[in-house]
Each structure stands twice: as C-alpha cells, then as structure tokens.
Image (tube, rainbow, N blue to C red):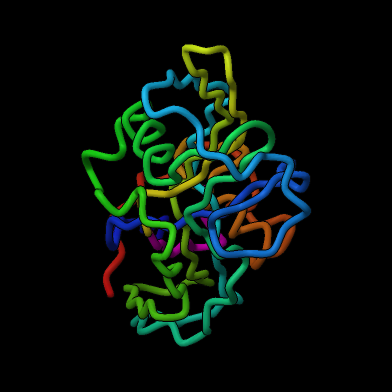
Amino acid sequence: MGIKEGCLAAGVVAALLAGAGACTSDGGEPVAEPKATAEPACKDGTYAWFNVDRRDVLTGVAAQQKLGKGGGTLTREVTPLHAPRVAVAFERGPRIDTRAVLRSLGTRTGDVDDDPGFTDVHRPAPDPRAVTTAVEGAGAFVNYSWVKQVVADFTYTCGNGGRTTGRATSWVVNGSGVLDCSLPAEDAKEGDPALAAARFSCDPHDPAAKPGGGPPPRPASS
C-alpha cells in the first residue's frame, strides 16, 4: 500500500504566513495597529508582485492506524494543524479594495480563473476532520489533508507617485491523502504534505518519513 492522494474540491480560503505581524488585515483576524491610511488609493494604479510563493501546505494529520490483510476504513480523526484563509494585509500607504488585490494576485498566478472564490475573504476554511478514507491491504496508514496556498507581497503605485504595500494570501485546492508508513512516497522532497504527515505520525525511521522514491500516488477513496 503506497501513497494515495487526491484533490477533493477546489476552494478558496487562506492564511497569512509569518512575517506579516506588523500589517493590518482585511481577512477577519485582529492584528497590530494599521500603518496604512484610511483614505483610499487611486483606481487606476499598477500592481507589482514579488516573493510569490505557491505551495502545498499540510492542514491536518491523523495518528497512524494499523490494519490487517483485508484493509478497511481509517477511523482516526484528523487533527487540524493549519486553518487557511483569504486575506490582504496592508503595510503602508492608502487602502485598496481587497477583492481587487486578490484578483490581481490570482491573475498573476493563473488561479482566479480556476476558482472565483479566490477573492472571497469571508469563505470558511475546510474542515479536515470531514474526510473518511478506505484502504485495501495491510499496513500502518496515516490520513492527512492539505491545501495549495498562494502568498505574495505587492506594491500598488498610482500615477501621482502614491504607493501602497502589503501582502495577499489565498488558496485554490482542498486535498487529502493516505500514506503507508512502511513505503516511501515517490520523489518525496522537503515540503511535500505526504512527507510532513509521515514525520508527524509515522515512526522516525519509517521509509515514508524520508525523502526518496516509491510507488506513485493514487486518488484517495472516501
């Protein structure tokens, strides 16, 4: 039994990564006192995006569960680790419409056309505990969930020289998978959700907890 991983649904909600503690947020969570002014920026400015980071992020993982020859349904509840959300944090300068900022980011990364919810700052995060997975064969299995998160810094410059800076974040994929601790993930590398999940729940010396080759991932059954 190897890695079984799939995309359950496309959606949007994201979380601010570390580093935006001095910013103000339009994503619904309390933050430090704003540096941005209350006066809105111009409507015909230009965006510049940098430090664009688009990656899979582990959002939940269950304890390993050992099953016999016939396999079965995994019953260990997934423990939430990260609640993604959609947000814009303004650091300096006049405020901009948050949906416009996120729309610009989604256009830059190609994500906004795949999921219009990319710009919805009010959309709730998915509940990783809602996943039920069945497996075939014996093994020590681990259920986990992940999202593809997009985070980037930006500047918005007006024709009169006014400038707004900040950070935007969202996500486009709500996925889940199941791994067998006795088998390494195919081409697993640092940062992969499957590898991170294995390091949470498998024994330290199990093959799944180490980068390397292995069987290809297959869609998870729910």
Residue at image position (62%, 29%) is 165
Q: Quadrant of the C terminus?
A: bottom left
Q: Pick whichever, 167 or 66, lies toward us.
A: 167
| Residue displayed at 45% across by 67% down | 125
The answer to which quarter of the image holds residue 199 is bottom right
Residue 48, placed above or below residue 36: above
> What residue lies at 35% left-to-right and 44% top-to-bottom?
216
Q: Is residue 178 magenta?
A: yes
Magenta: main secondary structure equals strand
Q: Please say if 12 is above or below 159.
A: below
Does the image show residue 188? no
Q: Which quadrant would residue 135 be assigned to in this image?
A: bottom left
Give left or right: position of 98 versus 23. Answer: left
Residue 61 coordinates in the image, percent (x, y): 56, 69
Q: Does the magenta run of residues contain 115?
A: no
View extreme (left): residue? 113
Which of 134/109 is in front? Answer: 109
- Picture coordinates of residue 140 (x, y %)? 53, 72
Q: On the rendered image, what quadrant is the N terminus found in?
A: bottom left
Disc count in the image?
Answer: 0
Q: Quadrant of residue 2?
A: bottom left
30 displayed left or right of 151: right
Query: Residue placed at 55% from the left, 56% from the top?
Result: 58
- Residue 220, horizontal then vertical, whole percent: 31, 64
Q: Does residue 218 appear in this view?
A: yes
- The residue nearer to you, when weighing 22 against 41, is 41
Name the outermost residue toward the bottom.
Answer: 75
Q: Position of residue 124 (x, y in %)?
A: 43, 69
From which residue to which does the magenta span run?
175-184
